[in-house]
Amino acid sequence: MGNEPHRPELLAVASDVEHVYHVMQEVTALEELLENEDDLNKSMEARGSIKKLMTSPDLMETLERLECVKGEPKWGLSLDERELIQAARNKVNDC
């Protein structure tokens, strides 16, 4: 371990990862609906729902807790979890 200080603030919390996972599942379902939707009003509604999910204060706070200062996912995450957090941040940035 060396002389590095213990920094628990750099460790991810499982409930935060679970929250992001559920939001991203909802977004994926909405995106699939959007791909198959011919009705413009329903398409606009789905896009609005995606934006609302991805820019919600709750999700933004969760992502902030899961990221270090440089925007990288915190320690203690699996590769899949890291990719999930990065995909969520990219989706937020696209909104």
Image (tube, rainbow, N blue to C red):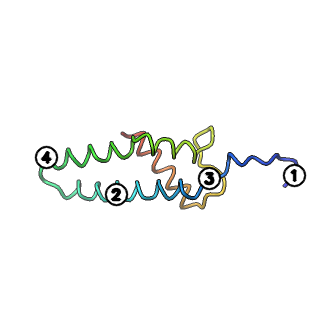
**Marker disc for residue 40:** 4
Which comes sooner in the sequence, label 3 or label 1? 1
Give the amino acid type for the residue marked by disc 4 in the picture. Leu
Label annotation for residue 91 = none
x and y, in percent, of residue 39 in the image:
12, 51
For label 2, the crowd category at 10 Å Cα-Cα, with few meaning under 14, some 14 to 19 and many 20 or more, is few
Q: Quadrant of the N terminus?
A: bottom right
The residue type indicated by label 3 comes to Ala
Across and down, in percent, residue 30 comes to 28, 55
Residue holding disc 1: 2
Q: Secondary structure under badge 1?
A: loop
Query: For the residue carrying disc 1, how many other residues have a C-alpha within 10 Å: few (<14), some (14-19), or many (20+)?
Result: few
Q: Amino acid at mark 1?
A: Gly
Q: Position of residue 5 (x, y in %)?
A: 82, 46
Q: Amino acid at mark 2?
A: Thr
93, 48: nearer the viewer = 48
Query: Distance from label 3 to label 1 (Cα)?
Result: 21 Å
Q: Is residue 4 above or below residue 21?
A: above
4 or 3: tag closer to the N-terminus: 3
Q: State yes or no: discs 2 and 3 in contact (Cβ < 8 Å).
A: no
Residue position marked by numbered label 3 in the rendering: 12
Of badges 4 and 3, the one in the foreground is 3
Contact (CB < 8 A) between labels 4 and 3?
no
Q: Nearer the viewer, residue 63 or 80?
A: 63
**Residue corresponding to mark 2:** 28
Q: Earlier in the sequence, mark 2 or mark 4?
A: 2
**Which residue corresponds to the image point at 23% horizontal and 58% vertical from the top-left?**
33
